[in-house]
C-alpha cells in the first residue's frame, strides 16, 4: 500500500542519548516534512525538504537535524535528547500543490 | 508569515447536532486550504480541501467554503455522529510548499 512509513511506532529514550526517527515514502513526492504534536500547540514544523539534497528549518528546529539523501527517505535525528523533546512526531510528504500525506506517528518519551 | 487560527476546544455536541468549527487565516497570495482529521492514536488524514476563492470542499457530510473576503474556511456538518469524534485541524499551503496548521479542535459527540 502506497504511503508513508514511520519507525519506530514508539520509543522511550534516556536523556542525552542519540535517536533517529525514520520516515520513508513511496509516492515519489518531492517535499517532505517533520512535525511535532504537543497538546494545546497543534503541529509545529521542525524541518522540511522541498527536494532531495535540500533541507530547511521550520518553526522549532533546535536540537534536531535532518538529511535528504534521496527522494524516499527523510530521517530526523535528535543528537542528545532532552525531556522537552517528549512528543508525538509526524512525517509528511507532498507532491506539488496538493494535500500532504501523513505517517502514523512516532510517540517519543525522553526520561 | 502565514498563520491559521481556529476555535479552541473541546467542542461537545449531542449526536445529530449541527457542527461549526471556525477557521481564519493570514497569508500572502492565494493559498490552498485544508481540513485534516485525526482519530485517536492515528495520523492526520485529509478531510477536504479548496484551492481557490469560493471553492467548496466537501467529504463525508462535512463542508467548508474558501472565503477570501473574510479569510475564513469554517468547517460545517449538518448532523454529527459519535464516529465523528476526533481532532480537526485547519491548514493552509502557501508558497514554498510549506503547510501551516492551526492548533486543532477536539470534537466529542455524545449519544
Image (spheres, rainbow, N blue to C red):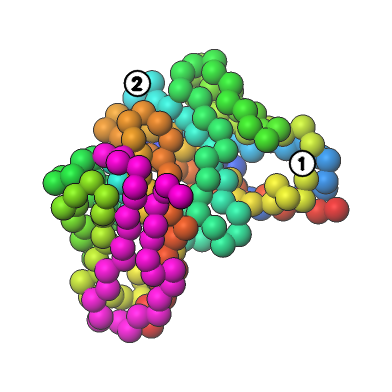
Question: Seen in the image, is B40 located left or right of residue B85?
Answer: left
The mark that comes first in sequence, 1 or 2, is: 2
Crowd class of label 1 (few under 14; some 14 to 19; many from 20; radius 10 Å):
many
Q: Height in image: B88 above or below A107?
A: above
Circle 1 or circle 2, nearest the eye: 1
At 34% from the left and 24% from the top, the residue drawn is B28
Residue located beneath label 1 in the image = B80
- Rendered location of residue A27, percent (x, y): 35, 42
* Residue lying furthest front: A1
At 16% from the left and 53% from the top, the residue drawn is A69
Q: Is residue A27 magenta?
A: yes
Residue located beneath label 2 in the image = B29
**Proximity of marks 1 and 2: CB atoms separated by less than 8 Å:** no
At 49% from the left and 16% from the top, the residue drawn is B53
Give the chain letter at badge 2: B
* Range shown magenta: A1-30
- Rendered location of residue A48, percent (x, y): 26, 47
Q: Can the viewer see residue A30?
A: yes
**Disc ID at residue B102:** none
Q: Quadrant of residue B2?
A: top left
Q: Nearer the viewer, residue A72 or B100?
A: A72
Q: Nearer the viewer, residue A71 or B46?
A: A71
Q: Height in image: A79 above or below A2?
A: below
- Rendered location of residue A77, percent (x, y): 24, 66
Question: Seen in the image, is B106 located left or right of residue A60?
Answer: right
Q: Can the viewer see residue A89?
A: no
Q: Is residue B66 magenta?
A: no
Amino acid at each position: 500500500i502506497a504511503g508513508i512509513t514511520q519507525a519506530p511506532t514508539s520509543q522511550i529514550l534516556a536523556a542525552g542519548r542519540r535517536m533517529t526517527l525514520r520516515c520513508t515514502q513511496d509516492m515519489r513526492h518531492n517535499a517532505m516534512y517533520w512535525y511535532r504534536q504537543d497538546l494545546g500547540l497543534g503541529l509545529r514544523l521542525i524541518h522540511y525538504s522541498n527536494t532531495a539534497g535540500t533541507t530547511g528549518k521550520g518553526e522549532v528546529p533546535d536540537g534536531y537535524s535532518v538529511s535528504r539523501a534521496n527522494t524516499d527517505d527523510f530521517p530526523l535525528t535528535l543528537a542528545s535528547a532532552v525531556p522537552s523533546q517528549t512528543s508525538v512526531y509526524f512525517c509528511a510528504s507532498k507532491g506539488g500543490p496538493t494535500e500532504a500525506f501523513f505517517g502514523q506517528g512516532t510517540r517519543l518519551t525522553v526520561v | 508569515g502565514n498563520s491559521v487560527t481556529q476555535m479552541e476546544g473541546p467542542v461537545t455536541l449531542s449526536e445529530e447536532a449541527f457542527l461549526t468549527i471556525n477557521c481564519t487565516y493570514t497569508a500572502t497570495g492565494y493559498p490552498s486550504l485544508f481540513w485534516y482529521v485525526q482519530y485517536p492514536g492515528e495520523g492526520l488524514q485529509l478531510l477536504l480541501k479548496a484551492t481557490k476563492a469560493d471553492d467548496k470542499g466537501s467529504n463525508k457530510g462535512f463542508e467548508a467554503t474558501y472565503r477570501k473576503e473574510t479569510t475564513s474556511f469554517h468547517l460545517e456538518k449538518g448532523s454529527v455522529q459519535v464516529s465523528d469524534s476526533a481532532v480537526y485541524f485547519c491548514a493552509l499551503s502557501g508558497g514554498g510548499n510549506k503547510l501551516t496548521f492551526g492548533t486543532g479542535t477536539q470534537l466529542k459527540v455524545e449519544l
